[in-house]
Amino acid sequence: MSNIDNSDTNFNNVINISIIVTLFFLLILSFKYADVSFISVHPNKFLTEVLLCGLFAAIPFIAIGLKRHATNKQIAKVVFIVFIFFYLFSTLVEFSGLNTYLNNVNIDVSPSIKKLSPSSSISTPIKLNKKFEYTELEKSLLAITIIIIIVIGYLAYSIHDWPTYLRNKDIIIEIAIFTILNTIPQIIISSNRNSSLDNVAKRLIVSVVYYALMYGILQSGGFFTNIFSNTTDRENLEELNLSEISTSSL
């Protein structure tokens, strides 16, 4: 590992700032658009989606924590925090209208939610394709988000925390788990909104690339090392895993 201590103060601080900015940005969009078009028609599907987003985002941290010899208490704490965060995040994404916008939603109104007219009560399909017109504040937050992403990428490249006990096989397995589980909810969200096959395929490709890249950035920045071990036991963890590799190779 190289320059891991810097990630404690720099990389993790930038991650925290990015979380705050992202949630603030989504809150603004949620209050502005308050998109409940899908929720009002399919509340059970929406609840399933946000639960899956939280659960499938949290599960990979079990495998990541076990590989780093984290305690059960550490793993449980991280898994709980990740679940709550992504549950909240996916809820705000829905209310902000981003799911509607990205999937070009076309929802058939259920019989229980009919649009009444003087002559008839008919369930009609409604096209929910919202056009986003960002305000100056929203544009500023979006610009700040992009800058933060660039800074995070640079810090991850500079810190380069790839522990020697992580073999190529371990990295591939962790990337696969992290990417596949986080991508599944995105495909379900697109499918539930009757998105076109082309759009679902694009969502799949973008999600796979995004989460694979996100894993690399978080690992290289020392994020996983920091949340599953403290400063005093990092060297012991490195030695323990190195001894395991040496023993297995004999």
Image: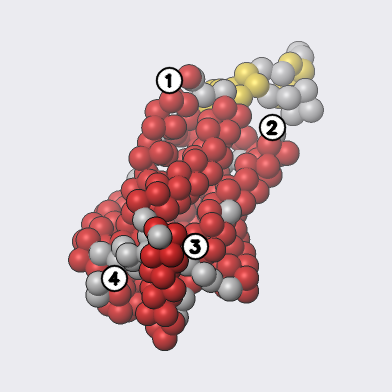
Alpha-carbon span between mark 4 and mark 1: 42 Å
Residue pictured at 68% horizontal, 44% vertical? 47
Q: Say which amino acid is labelled 3.
A: Lys
Label 3 belongs to which residue? 67
Report the label total: 4
Label 2: how many residues lie within 10 Å, few (<14), some (14-19) or many (20+)? Answer: some
Is there CB contact under 8 Å for labels 1 and 3?
no
**How far apart, in angstroms, are the residues tagged by discs 2 and 4?**
51 Å
Can residue 98 be seen by looking at this rendering? yes
Estimate how packed mark 4 is, as few (under 14), some (14 to 19) or many (20 or more) residues with alpha carbons within 10 Å.
some
- Whether pointer 2 and pointer 1 mark residues with C-beta atoms closer than 8 Å, the reply is no
Relative to 54, 171 lies left or right: left
Mark 2, residue position: 41
Q: Amino acid at mark 4?
A: Met
Amino acid type of disc 1? Asp
Give the farthest residue toward the front: 250
Q: Give residue 20's position: percent from left, percent from top.
A: 43, 65
Name the residue furthest right. 112
At x 43%, y 25%, the residue is 201
What residue is shown at x 47% (from left), y 26% (from top)?
200
Q: Nearer the viewer, mark 2 or mark 1?
A: 1
Residue at (48% x, 71% y) in the render = 228
Q: Residue furthest bottom?
A: 232
Cα distance in 3D space between marks 2 and 3: 43 Å
Which residue is tagged 4?
1
